[in-house]
Image: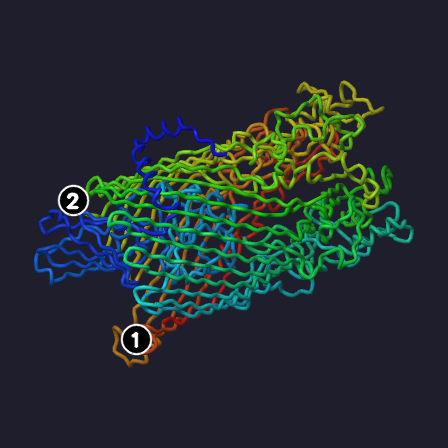
């Protein structure tokens, strides 16, 4: 509900001294509909005579020869002129005044949302019939002397001539200062906007528009609805800090694409790009791995064939234009090297007589299994009951879906896998783009643009390689057929610019956008129906046909992997509708602007719950299994446990709810660009945002509220970790539901209308338009991702319950179905009611200088402060020290089932610390259930969302640019920065008791980031040396281009995820805990330290690998005939040209020589660094740090 506070708004308006402008804006806006993000730009300038005096009433005509657009304005009394509402393009400025020669300035390049200063135009004395023509200084055009925002531009030349691995436009963002990220765009596909952190903000705080229409998947704020090939893009404008009030919705940055349009000349191209694994270098780890047949581990299929074409031109000259583009993608996308342990042929039959596991000394040791139906390390089926045999046969069918081993050396030198390979996903796509521009009359111009994508991906691995994959069926195992994802999408934009008077202009646009995803098994190859699987489960499965999920544990150093297919078939649909309007008014030396932005969003998505059942298999007999308590029962391999049905844990959901998520958002603003003097410009404004929470149209949101939890009505937890149904209590104690009105419709409160002040300035330091001081501050609010509210619907206990069964046997599951209600609630989400909206304060101060013709240098300090960020912490974590308390000891671990006052044989170190118990016999120490220890009985972890996260970012940014020039263009950017935060992402789990302990370097923090790009037209030899004409076809018209990138690594943690002291996970601060409690030395005992509080864990101590990458391309341009209208371009593109291996992750884990649930008070537990501690374990993603990839291309231009 919109609940604006009038007092708050008025007070803030008075403070900003803008109440008059707000009133004027409201009056003006009534003459037009609504506003959105801006696609047009504004040209400023001034006119002088030879003595330097300003010329008023001069006629200034701004024309785009390509499409016939003209705009005529008149200079004011101060000799300045302003022309707002111009589409991006290259303009000619013609100035005429009585008594002076006509002046023409050509090559004035205007970008989207740009405030371009054309500089001082000096008229020469003479007759009006005479004219003087000059070319605009490209360096001065690059100077931003009319605004204070931090922004950058990717030009059409860069998009055409600087090749990127995958031809994805988002890859060009790395050429902008303040960017930190590793975009994986080696294949065409949607997604990846969340691969970047812009100026220290979170990766999902961006807005991505195409011609003003939003192109964001609002589920995670990281995907996109459609892609657009780089040949169809005119330019990309990136706003990174303290931008004007006309921009909103996202607080972390704006990426605005402008598509190409038709012109008075027919233009177009046809293109072909080709890749083949035979042209590429092998992946470092893949090459290192020896296969069992002594053959080299060659790369998987890496075959790209991109075929496209486009044409644009006039339907009616100066009136009606069209642009049409199509691109077809045939891609086999490599998924990188995958290594895991897969069952051997004998193990699938139950024969473990030849099986080994990695030993503690790095050498293989034999697997030992013993017990009922086991003889000589072999499972014997002859004596099995019908139920036991059914389990064996069903598990066997699932294991037979796994590939057979192909790698040697398992168990030796720490090698934990027997299968290694590189596999490829087939991702065929098609992209259609149509744009029509129509000059209705001299005062109204309209365009409409439509983009459509079709995509049908098939992958043997799931999710699909790269950032575009689904999570609905996730596994690193190659299953026959794999998963498929259909992923169509479309994006539409219509824009109308109307010149109401010479000084009043309106821009209206509307932009709906849509995407759909459907994931399922290919031909049912990994379904229970096709494979004849009839696994006993708690509840019959009818909604899905997926095989049960399985995980295999308890063998350190062994890379077991299991399927996660419970979300298939999976479907989601996301639709966004933007309606936008901007009104501009030039009044004296003020350019006033006001407008509105409205967005309607809907997201229909089905839950990804495990209604197919999820098993966790380990080693050792289970308390409820086939051999409980038998001393001769030994299961030394989780695969053997699976075949006889012994699981350590099992869970199954009863339903997969369908969420119908919706939101409305309204923002409006007013701003002024005030040209105080010819050298000083002030850019200020105020935006007002109404960002109510997303809600479920079915009204099924459920959240846990600690204030509603009544300890007197708590359930009783059995030693096995289940709810005792006979003991009373409310299993839903503390839950609140939107359906009964106990929480707001969106789960938390709306904050009403929120002000967002913006202020910037630009000062021409010497009046020469060569050196400009710039700066500004801004406040922005952010629309958070939809996933935050999805889980409270998907895990609503009124719709779905997940039964968790402790250690038992699969054959017993059907008999336990009646105890479903006894399981504790898992996956429950809570949220603070205040609903504060994430807020970013950005600020910058810098200087721009034209250091040479066409070349500018930009130096700036850029900082951000982020407040009210979404954080998550487990409020049901076991308190520190809880395992030492008498009331938390498990009676089953003591003689006679009675807990004594002092633990027998207590180690003296605990007694010296004032403790009566060591914690070894507490609930959960000898089982997997800590349920009796948690504060809120009847619940597992409770992810409690809060709006209290904070971060700060400080940086020095440098940029050297030479654009809009012939012969050589280049850009080089460098960022030196530090980013600190309490949580790096919305759902990063914080310390459950003190979030300040998590304040440290952000997960994306990279101290140094450098990127350079260049395009060089190599001089032809025949221009300098005489020779025959035919020789020029060999020696002339070459281009060299490329991208060079260096950056340092990101912070990492170390540890093994266990908490030794209290039963509470220390999680991300393991490194700090180790340093505090014990050093990383061999033989230390983590059970016996003195009791103490947890400490802050620094992530600055360890870093992942850095990146060094060189992409280089060589083009040969072949003119056809004497005209330059037709040509062929041959391209050789090398990504990571020098084949430098770029290692990302490192092994920073630690070893513990006992499992937590096997510790005894007298044990000496050794914690140690493995022999390969600090060694590289993986490379960067294929789009950023792949081995060398060669791409061949050809283009025909006309």
The residue indicated by pointer 2 is: 78
Of the image marks 1 and 2, the number of the one nearer the N terminus: 2
Left or right relative to 824: residue 31: left
Question: Could you tell me if residue 541 is visible in this image?
Answer: yes
Mark 2 Cα within 10 Å, few/some/many (few <14, many 20+)? some
Q: Position of residue 818 (x, y in %)?
A: 81, 38
Q: Foreground residue, 595 or 1165?
A: 595
Q: Which residue is mark 1?
A: 1123
Going 16% across and 58% down the picture, which residue do you hit? 103
- Rendered residue at 61%/53% (across/down): 463
Please tell me whether mark 2 sits on a helix, a strand or a loop. Answer: loop
- The residue at 75%/44% (across/down) is 618
What x and y, as percent, mark residue 71? 25, 55
Indicate left or right for 336 with 327 as reference. right
* Rendering quarter of residue 987: top right
Query: Which image quadrant is residue 106 in?
Result: bottom left
**How many C-alpha atoms fall within 10 Å of the one at disc 1: few (<14), some, or many (≥20)?**
few
**Front in this rendered view, residue 236 or 1100:** 236
Q: Residue 406: which disc?
A: none
Q: What's the CA distance linking mark 1 and mark 2?
A: 46 Å
**Residue 929 percent location from the top left of the image:** 73, 34
Secondary structure of the residue carrying tag 1 is loop
Height in image: 180 above or below 1038? above
Residue lying furthest front in this view?
31
Q: Is any atom of residue 1045 visible in this view?
A: no
Nearest the camera: 2 or 370? 2
């Amino acid at each position: 509900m919109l609940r604006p506070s009038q007092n708050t708004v008025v007070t803030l308006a008075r403070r900003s001294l803008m109440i008059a402008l707000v009133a004027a804006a409201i009056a003006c806006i009534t003459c037009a509909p609504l506003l959105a993000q801006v696609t047009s730009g504004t040209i400023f300038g001034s006119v002088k005579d030879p003595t330097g005096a300003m010329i008023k009433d001069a006629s200034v005509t701004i024309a785009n020869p390509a499409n016939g657009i003209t705009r005529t304005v008149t200079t004011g009394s101060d000799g300045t002129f302003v022309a707002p509402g111009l589409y991006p393009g290259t303009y000619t400025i013609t100035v005429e005044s009585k008594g002076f020669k006509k002046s023409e300035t050509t090559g004035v390049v205007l970008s989207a949302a740009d405030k371009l200063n054309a500089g001082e135009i000096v008229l020469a004395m003479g007759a009006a019939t005479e004219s003087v023509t000059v070319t605009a200084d490209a360096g001065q055009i690059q100077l931003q002397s009319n605004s204070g925002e931090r922004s950058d531009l990717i030009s059409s030349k860069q998009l055409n001539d600087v090749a990127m691995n995958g031809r994805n436009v988002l890859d060009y963002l790395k050429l902008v200062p303040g960017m930190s990220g590793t975009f994986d765009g080696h294949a065409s596909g949607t997604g990846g906007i969340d691969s970047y952190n812009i100026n220290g903000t979170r990766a999902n705080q961006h807005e991505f528009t195409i011609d003003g229409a939003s192109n964001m998947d609002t589920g995670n704020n990281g995907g996109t609805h459609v892609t657009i090939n780089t040949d169809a893009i005119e330019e990309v404008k990136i706003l990174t800090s303290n931008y004007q009030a006309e921009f909103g919705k996202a607080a972390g940055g704006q990426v605005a694409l402008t598509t190409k349009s038709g012109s008075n000349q027919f233009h177009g191209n046809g293109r072909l790009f080709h890749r083949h694994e035979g042209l590429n270098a092998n992946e470092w780890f893949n090459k290192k791995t020896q296969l069992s047949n002594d053959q080299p581990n060659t790369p998987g299929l890496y075959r790209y064939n991109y075929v496209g074409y486009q044409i644009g031109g006039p339907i009616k000259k100066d009136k009606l234009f069209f642009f049409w583009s199509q691109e077809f993608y045939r891609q086999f996308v490599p998924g990188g090297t995958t290594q895991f342990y897969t069952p051997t042929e004998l193990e699938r039959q139950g024969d473990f007589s030849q099986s080994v596991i990695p030993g503690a000394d790095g050498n293989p040791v034999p697997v030992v299994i013993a017990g009922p139906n086991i003889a000589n390390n072999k499972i014997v089926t002859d004596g099995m009951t019908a139920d036991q045999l059914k389990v064996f046969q069903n598990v066997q069918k699932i294991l037979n879906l796994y590939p057979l081993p192909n790698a040697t050396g398992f168990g030796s030198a720490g090698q934990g896998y027997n299968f290694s390979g590189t596999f490829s996903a087939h991702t065929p796509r098609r992209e259609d783009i149509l744009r029509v521009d129509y000059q209705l009359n001299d005062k109204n111009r309209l365009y409409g643009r439509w983009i459509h994508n079709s995509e049908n991906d098939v992958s043997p691995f799931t999710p699909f390689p790269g950032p575009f994959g689904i999570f609905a069926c996730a596994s690193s195992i190659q299953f026959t057929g794999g998963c498929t994802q259909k992923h169509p999408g479309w994006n539409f934009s219509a824009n109308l610019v109307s010149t109401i008077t010479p000084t009043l202009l309106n821009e209206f646009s509307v932009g709906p956008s849509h995407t759909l995803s459907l994931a399922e098994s290919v031909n049912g190859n990994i379904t229970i129906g096709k494979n004849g699987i009839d696994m006993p489960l708690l509840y019959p499965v009818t909604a899905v046909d997926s095989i049960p999920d399985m995980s295999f544990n308890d063998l350190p150093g062994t890379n077991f992997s299991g399927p996660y297919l419970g979300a298939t078939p999976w479907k989601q649909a996301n639709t966004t509708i933007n309606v936008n309007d901007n009104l501009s008014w030039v009044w004296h030396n003020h350019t006033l602007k006001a407008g509105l932005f409205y967005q309607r969003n809907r997201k229909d998505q089905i839950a990804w719950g495990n209604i197919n059942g999820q098993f966790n298999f380990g080693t050792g007999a289970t308390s409820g299994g086939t051999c409980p308590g038998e001393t001769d029962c030994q299961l030394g391999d989780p695969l053997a446990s699976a075949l006889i049905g012994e699981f350590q844990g099992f869970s199954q959901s009863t339903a997969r709810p369908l969420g119908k998520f919706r939101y409305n958002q309204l923002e409006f603003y007013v701003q002024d660009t005030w040209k105080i003097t010819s050298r000083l410009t002030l850019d200020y404004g105020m935006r007002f945002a109404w960002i109510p929470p997303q809600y479920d149209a079915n009204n099924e949101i459920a959240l846990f509220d600690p204030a509603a939890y009544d300890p007197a009505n708590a359930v009783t937890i059995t030693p096995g970790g289940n709810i005792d149904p006979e003991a009373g209590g409310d299993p839903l104690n503390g839950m609140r539901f939107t359906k009964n009105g106990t929480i707001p419709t969106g789960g938390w409160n709306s904050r009403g209308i929120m002000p967002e002040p913006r202020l910037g300035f630009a000062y021409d330091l010497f009046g020469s338009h060569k050196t400009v001081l710039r700066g500004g501050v801004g406040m922005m609010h952010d629309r958070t991702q939809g996933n935050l509210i999805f889980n409270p619907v998907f895990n609503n206990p009124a719709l779905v319950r997940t039964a968790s069964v402790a250690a038992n046997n699969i054959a017993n599951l059907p008999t336990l179905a009646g105890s479903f209600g006894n399981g504790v609630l898992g996956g429950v989400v809570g949220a603070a009611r205040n609903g504060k909206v994430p807020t970013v304060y950005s600020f910058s101060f810098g200087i721009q200088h034209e250091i040479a013709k066409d070349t500018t240098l930009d130096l700036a300090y850029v900082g951000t402060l982020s407040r009210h960020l979404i954080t998550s912490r487990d409020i049901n974590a076991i308190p520190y020290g809880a395992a030492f308390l008498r009331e938390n000891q498990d009676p089953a671990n003591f003689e006679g089932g009675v807990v004594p006052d002092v633990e027998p044989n207590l180690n003296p170190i605990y007694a010296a610390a004032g403790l009566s118990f060591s914690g070894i016999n507490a609930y959960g120490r000898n089982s997997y259930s800590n349920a009796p220890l948690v504060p809120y009985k009847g619940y597992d972890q409770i992810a409690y969302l809060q709006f209290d996260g904070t971060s700060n970012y400080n940086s020095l940014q440098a940029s050297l640019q030479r654009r809009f020039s012939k012969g050589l263009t280049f850009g080089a950017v460098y960022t030196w920065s530090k980013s600190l935060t309490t949580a790096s992402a919305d759902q990063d789990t914080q310390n459950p008791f003190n979030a300040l302990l998590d304040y440290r370097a952000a997960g994306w923090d990279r101290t140094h980031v450098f990127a350079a790009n260049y395009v060089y037209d190599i001089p032809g030899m025949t221009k300098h040396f005489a020779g025959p004409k035919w020789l020029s076809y060999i020696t002339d018209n070459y281009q060299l281009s490329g991208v060079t990138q260096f950056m340092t690594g990101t912070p990492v943690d170390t540890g093994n995820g266990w908490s030794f002291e209290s039963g509470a996970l220390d999680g991300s601060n393991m490194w700090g805990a180790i340093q505090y409690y014990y050093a990383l030395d061999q033989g230390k005992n983590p059970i016996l330290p003195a009791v103490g509080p947890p400490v802050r864990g620094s992530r600055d101590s360890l870093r992942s690998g850095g990146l060094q990458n060189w992409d280089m391309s060589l083009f040969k341009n072949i003119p056809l005939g004497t005209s330059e209208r037709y040509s062929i371009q041959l391209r050789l593109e090398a990504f990571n040209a020098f084949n430098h291996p770029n290692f990302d992750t490192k092994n920073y884990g630690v070893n513990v020589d006992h499992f937590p649930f096997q510790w005894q008070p007298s044990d000496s537990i050794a914690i140690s660094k493995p022999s390969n501690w600090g060694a590289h374990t993986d490379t960067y993603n294929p789009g950023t740090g792949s081995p060398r990839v060669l791409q061949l291309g050809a283009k025909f231009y006309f």
